Structures are given as structure tokens and as C-alpha cells.
Amino acid sequence: MRDKRKRRSHFTDDERHRIVVEGAATTPKKICKEYGISLSTFYRWRARLLSRNRAQETARLQDLERENKRLKTQVAELWLDYTSLRTALISNTEQEC
């Protein structure tokens, strides 16, 4: 008896991405017929591409939130330095007068 193995796709990741993008511009049925793939394969590729994009967006958002927190801390520290120096300068000039 022959061993039934799944056939590996002959499309690269870049080609899959291009096919999914083309599917957004036209009907998935036409794209599937043109490239000889099934609708379920097309929808699986699209779902994988969307989940990958969401993961990248989530990582980017987390990086931006960390940077925002760091910058807010720096601004708060600089504001404290500014107010303490201003207070010291004002009290110093009042003592001289």
C-alpha cells in the first residue's frame, strides 16, 4: 500500500501574500481558479496572513507604549528639575534683595 503524504505547496510565502492581496482586489473564486488552489487554501492563507499582521501590530503597539511610558518619566523628571531649580533661583534672588 502506498504511503499517502500531503503535497507541499509550490508557492513561496511571497507568492502566497501576492495571491491573497490579488484576492482582495477581485473575487477569491477567480484567483483560486487562476492559480489552481482551493478556496479553503486561499482562506487559510488569508487567515494566516491576517494573524501575522495582527501580531506585528500588537508588538509595535507594545513598543510604542513602552517608549511613551519612558518619555513621560523623562518629562516628569525634567519638570521636577526645572521647578526645583526655579524655586532655588527665586529664593536666592529674594534673599539678595
Image (tube, grey):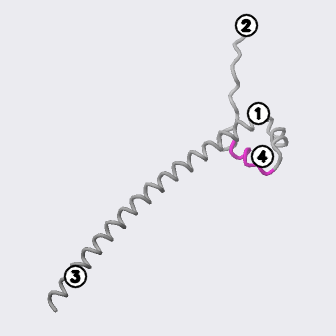
The part of the image, by quadrant, that contains residue 83 is bottom left
Mark nearest the camera among 4 and 3 is: 3
Cα distance between the residues tagged 2 and 1: 29 Å
Question: CA gap, disc 2 to disc 3?
Answer: 92 Å
Instruction: Please state which of residues 61 and 30 is positioned toward the viewer in this rendering.
Output: 61
Q: Locate residue 20: give its quadrant.
A: top right
Mark toward the start of the polypeptide (4 vs 1): 4
Q: Is residue 37 above or below residue 80?
A: above
Report crowding for label 2: few under 14, some 14 to 19, many 20 or more residues within 10 A (C-alpha).
few
Q: Which residue is mark 2?
A: 1
**Would residue 43 appear left or right of 26 to someone viewing this image?**
left
Which residue corresponds to mark 4?
A: 23
Q: Amino acid at mark 2?
A: Met
Mark 4 → mark 2, Cα distance in angstroms: 39 Å
Contact, CB < 8 Å: mark 4 with mark 1? Answer: no
How many other residues sit within 10 Å of disc 3, few (<14), some (14-19) or many (≥20)?
few
Residue in front for this viewpoint, 69 or 4: 69
What amino acid is found at the position of numbered circle 1 in the picture?
A: Ser
How dense is the environment of label 1, judged by Cα within 10 Å: few (below 14), some, or many (20 and up)?
A: few
Magenta-tinted stretch: 16-25
